[in-house]
Amino acid sequence: MEPIIHDASMKSLLIFLFSFLSLTSLACECPPSEPLSKEIADKFDVIFYGRIDSIKPCSSDGIGTAYFTIINLYKGAAEQHVAVDYDCTSECLMSLAKDESWIIYAVYQKFDLLTVSLCSPSRKKFTGGETDHYQVISQKSFDEENDFLQQSFGIKAFSSHNELNDKQREMQPHNEQPSAWGKLWLLLVSLAVLAIFFIVIKKFFKNDKQV
């Protein structure tokens, strides 16, 4: 006799998980999911737990922006109020909404632009008895994951805007200009080279006329 699932909620959960994982794997090509570890977390530039204050609608190129207030910053440099871009139209779209709380694993698209992907371990905090399907992959509850990140990285202080500007300058390629004496020296060397070149050319034409 085949086993029968008597618990309706468990049956609904299994159906939901199967549908969710099937649709995700078919629609968006992400690497195979693994339980969260510090090695996985280390791949991301900024990790934080925060609340969404507002959402900017999708742009013409399919990018939305979520504006977060960070509650706990675990990794990276960020101000307390930060904007995070995400895919909002393709097969890998994310569903973010105002007042939701998330653990975000973000990377820098460029220094001042954080982006989050559906393929990251980012997860929403479910309330009101909703089923946390992220727990199946992470193998940690939302609160357990917050504790894990705090133990692994600690809680970082928020950066000021000036500090972020300093970090940006440090990361940019340096195009250092020579000092005033250096410029004068370069000018003198250039003039000397031109003078030698002129003398050689003049001597060459003089010898040519004699021949």
Image: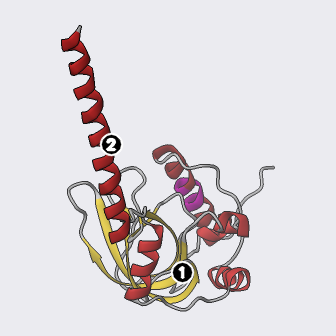
Write down the quadrant of residue 202 in the picture. top left
The residue labelled by disc 2 is 193
Residue type of the residue flagged with mark 1: Phe
Q: Which mark is residue 72?
A: none
Residue drawn at (29%, 56%) of the image: 187
Q: Residue at x 77, y 50 (%)?
A: 2
Nearer to me, 88 or 40: 40
- Please report whichever mark, 2 or 1, sits nearer to the chain's N-terminal start: 1
Quadrant in the rendering for residue 110? bottom left
Of badges 2 and 1, the one in the foreground is: 2
On the picture, is 5 further left or further right than 194? right
The correct choice, above or below, for 3 with respect to 169 in the image is above
Which amino acid type is shown beneath numbered disc 2?
Val
Neighbor class of circle 1 (other Cα within 10 Å; few <14, some 14-19, many 20+) is many
**Can see residue 125?**
no
Vertical comparison of 23 with 133: above or below? above
Task: Return the residue at label 1.
Answer: 48
Which stretch did the figure color magenta?
A: 15-20
**Residue 136 to residue 144: above or below:** above
Q: Was residue 19 drawn as part of the magenta stretch in this picture?
A: yes
